[in-house]
Image (spheres, rainbow, N blue to C red):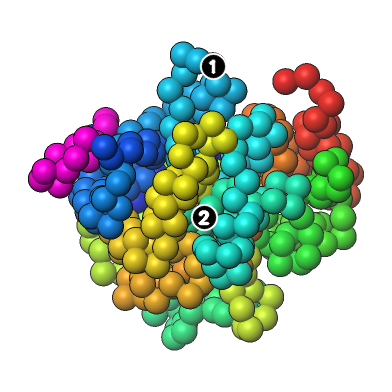
Amino acid sequence: MNQRRLLAVVVLLASSASLSACGVLPGSGEDRKTVTVWLMKDSASSAFLKRFTSAFEKEHSDLRLKIEIQSWTGIGDKVTKVLKGGDDVDVPDVIEVGNTQVAQYVDQGGLYDLTLESMRDLGMEDWIPGLAEPGQFNGSQYGIPWYAANRVVIYNKELFQSAGIKTTPKTREEWLHDTELLNRDGHQGIYLAGQDWYTLSGFIWDEGGDIAKGSGGLWKGSLDTPQALAGMAFYEQLQALGKGPKDADEENPPQTGVFASGDVGQIVAVPGSAAVITEKNPELKDKIGFFPVPGKTSAKPGSVFTGGSALVVTQRSGNHEAALDVVSALAGEKWQTDLARTMNYVPNKTSLAGAVVGEPGVGAMAKGAEQGHSAPASPRWAAVEANNPIKTYMTQVLTGTDPQKAAREASEKITKALDTSRAE
């Protein structure tokens, strides 16, 4: 899945093509073992990586850290190659992967089982669910949550005030009511594209449903369950309160550009979208606010689709102990706090949400992350997104097709795409 769409609007600093720790410690010996780590471009700033490298090597006098920055383009084939191996292939010890890619790589073979370490040392009981769940495969933990991002509601404070809305909504019912109030004087209460399946997924999870269900390695599309249909019904209600296209997703046209017009009350997007909006319309700089996607009740926010990255250790690593030291540090409290504050991410544990509480957008995101989920952990999930039947289904429902019929057809397509017995 293309997780980078969730994170593309975060303000990032340039990263070097390769950040080696050679020379960080004056007089360091040549007997240090090198630990090679692949991190993805723009996941962390150069300044963060330099801080981490320096501190890590001071604490581990027998190790030298070599961080190599990778491009998301073509990374799947590159990771597959190193996992399958060969004498001519240099295998990294630790790799950052998209959170929904873990199952695919485990299925191909070559990842080190981190279940014991997760339970004993890494505090897995406190991981945010949207990162922890996709890191599991057949009951074992292979991916260690690193950072996350998810959608919130970005709203125009001025329009809320002029509509007489004094507090942001906490429930779906309040959300619909306030959105209707915003539909006045030529304004749109909300801009919600018809094919925003990430947002739909949250509504489905709130109802107790899912996009697909897996059992014994077999997956079946489940958009036609009563719970999933109820989630789509709410989406239809909310989408009707704006003028979003029924046959396009949130990037066609970019919803940030629509919001930047100043006539839209709300969009559902990652907080970093605010930077794109104010770049287009600086007058909105002090008028933008954030709140978590409302839930069915005020007891907790609504469910959200979690994007982000996990850290994995290769089976063919020459030093699993050293690789685990790197993962433990990057996933630990100190560097999770630093990374979250540096990059405006959600930390990997619910207990660390306070690290970003002073940043309104990220704070709202962290609250929502507690109700986060991810795509079905099938090794063939990419096949679903390649020709996404969920988008087609949504457009059909919004344009008058019987929801049950459209959901049944979409579920059948999902089931077929997730069939592991089919050739790639």
User: Number of numbered discs present?
Assistant: 2
The residue pinned by badge 1 equals 86
**Residue 423 percent location from the top left of the image:** 78, 19
Above or below, 280 relative to 162: above
User: Is 25 covered by the magenta stretch?
Assistant: yes
Q: Main secondary structure of the magenta part?
A: loop
Name the foreground residue: 9 vs 52: 52
What's the residue type where badge 2 is placed?
Pro
Are the residues flagged by discs 1 and 2 in contact, CB closer than 8 Å?
no
Between the residue at mark 1 and the residue at mark 2, the CA separation in whole angstroms equals 28 Å
Look at the numbered disc 1 and give the secondary structure of its residue.
Answer: loop
Q: Residue furthest left?
A: 26
Dot label at residue 145: 2
Q: Quadrant of the N terminus?
A: top right
Name the foreground residue: 225 vs 331: 331
Look at the numbered disc 2 and give the secondary structure of its residue.
Answer: strand
**Residue 335 percent location from the top left of the image:** 34, 61
Tell me the residue at 42%/63% (across/down).
332
Q: Residues within 10 Å of mark 1 (few under 14, many from 20)?
A: few
Tell me the residue at 49%/43% (across/down).
320
Above or below, 228 relative to 399: below
Magenta-tinted stretch: 17-30
Name the foreground residue: 68 vs 27: 27
- The answer, for residue 172, to whether it is visible in the render is yes
**Left or right, 414 with reference to 350:** right
